[in-house]
Image: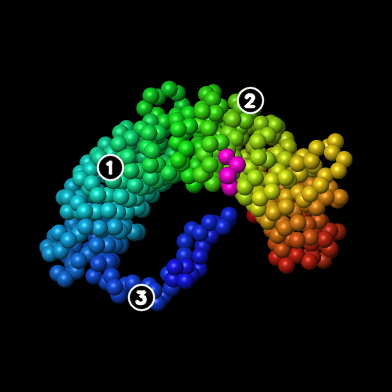
Amino acid sequence: MRSFFQDFDKDDIGNIRGCKMHDIVHDFVQFLSQKECTIIEAVKGANQRLELPGDYKVRHLTLIDVREGQLPTLFDNCKNMRTLRTLNFLTLLDSSITAISPGSIMQMKCLRTLNLSRNELNKVPKEIGELIHLRYMDLSFSRNLKELPDAVCDLYNLQTLDVVFCGELEKLPKAMGKLINLKHLYVLGCNKLRYLPKGIGSLKSLQVLDWFYVCEGDDDEALKLGDLGIMDQLQGSLSIDRLGNKDDASGIEKAQLGNKEHHSELRVFFQEGDEEQRKGDEEIVKALQPHQNLESLDIWDCHIGTTESLYWINSLRNLRRLGLYEWKFCEVFPPLGKLPSLEILEIWAIKKVKKVGVEFLGIEEEEEQVSGILFPKLKLLSFRSMDNWEEWAFVSEITIMPRLSELRIVECPKLKALPKIPALRTLEIWGCPILEGEYEKGVGKEWHNISHIPNLTIQSEW
């Protein structure tokens, strides 16, 4: 099967995100499906009637370049309308649909897939509930959409609902617990969404919930952090946003992230705050304790002052990627050198750190002898916006970062020198005036330590 496809696109940790079909296979598939798969350019704009040749038995229809207005009337005068049973790709790309008429929906009762992504929809009519065969509905990037009708909850065959980056969306229907076959719910970028409906917690088929918005207060209609505790079937990526409320530590404990063995990625975002929030954030971080199967972890805007609450980090034996961002009050890095699978590490804007030394490597100062290799699989290391960082110290007697091939240092104005890393193939230094002078090509005092690196960039501005 893989020989039919080529040019695989993978993410940072090796998961396949997409690929291309071989030209010959593509042409053959097009030939077989030419009267079932149709692309129509709606050059006359919306509010029009679209007609198809009488011998077409269209199952898959793509409309492109639909101008502002109502969804065109699709199937008037189509003789084969009654044979339409598995219309499983309707997409309106680069269009400006503002409304869907109830009549259009009633013409598509056999629809399996509805993709209205990247339109200007103001509302979805209640007649959407008539599409009882619908499995997949994509309304993502509908920037004017404020709410979904309650009738969406009548789509009991729906498996995927995507409202990613619907920036004006304020709420989801209360009765989402009726969507018993829902497997994938995507709500990333819905920043006006105050909470997720509580009924989501009862969806036993739900496998992917990409974003969890923490609700402030005691709204009985809201899904709480603790409700995640009974959702052990969740898998893939989960982001938890707006942490920092007084009850969030207790909620995180009840969420039992340590039982989510199928989660591969976790992102946590704390609310903006000051040093008074430090103690609460420390309790939340202490309670996180994700499952050891986790492969990727990001922590944003955390207000902790030390890293003691991250005591569990070294239990993540399968962690391949780690990002620590905007820790305004932290003065030291967590001990990460003994993470056996870590390949990518990004540390940005931990502004109070002045020295990176043995604590970062995971070595206790009283340890007389350290065996093994530190950061054994690390390939990419990135530091950015470390305003007060002056010194980076290695320990010469230990093997450190033997596989590191790419190092980026961005906007670290006080950093004086870099350790010697023999395996480097790419070094980027941006906005670091001291390093720029020390490592200037041909004349810098430390130039000889990096001159062997094949891909080298040193610039004064990022």
- Magenta segment, which residues? 291-296
Q: In this view, does 4 lie to the left or right of 103?
A: right
Residue ranking furthest to the bottom: 24
Which numbered circle lies on residue 279?
2
Q: How far apart are marks 2 and 3 (CA)?
A: 61 Å
Specify the quadrant that holds the N terminus. Answer: bottom left
The amino acid type found where label 1 is placed reads Tyr
State the residue at coordinates (67%, 55%): 380
Which numbered circle lies on residue 156?
1
Q: Is residue 48 above or below residue 350?
A: below
- Secondary element type, mark 3: helix
Sooner in the amino-acid sequence: mark 2 or mark 1 = 1
Q: Distance between the residues labelled 2 and 1?
A: 44 Å
Which numbered circle lies on residue 369?
none
Q: Tell me if mark 2 has few (under 14), some (14-19) or many (20+) residues whose alpha carbon lies within 10 angstroms of its own.
A: few
Q: Tell me if mark 1 has few (under 14), some (14-19) or many (20+) residues whose alpha carbon lies within 10 angstroms of its own.
A: many
State the residue at coordinates (71%, 43%): 336
Sooner in the amino-acid sequence: mark 1 or mark 3 = 3
Q: How is the image coloured?
A: rainbow
Residue 186 found in image quarter: top left
Q: Is residue 186 visible?
A: yes
**Residue 213 location (% of width, % of height):** 46, 35
- Secondary element type, mark 2: helix
State the residue at coordinates (43%, 22%): 218
Sooner in the amino-acid sequence: mark 2 or mark 3 = 3
**Residue 33 location (% of width, % of height):** 28, 70
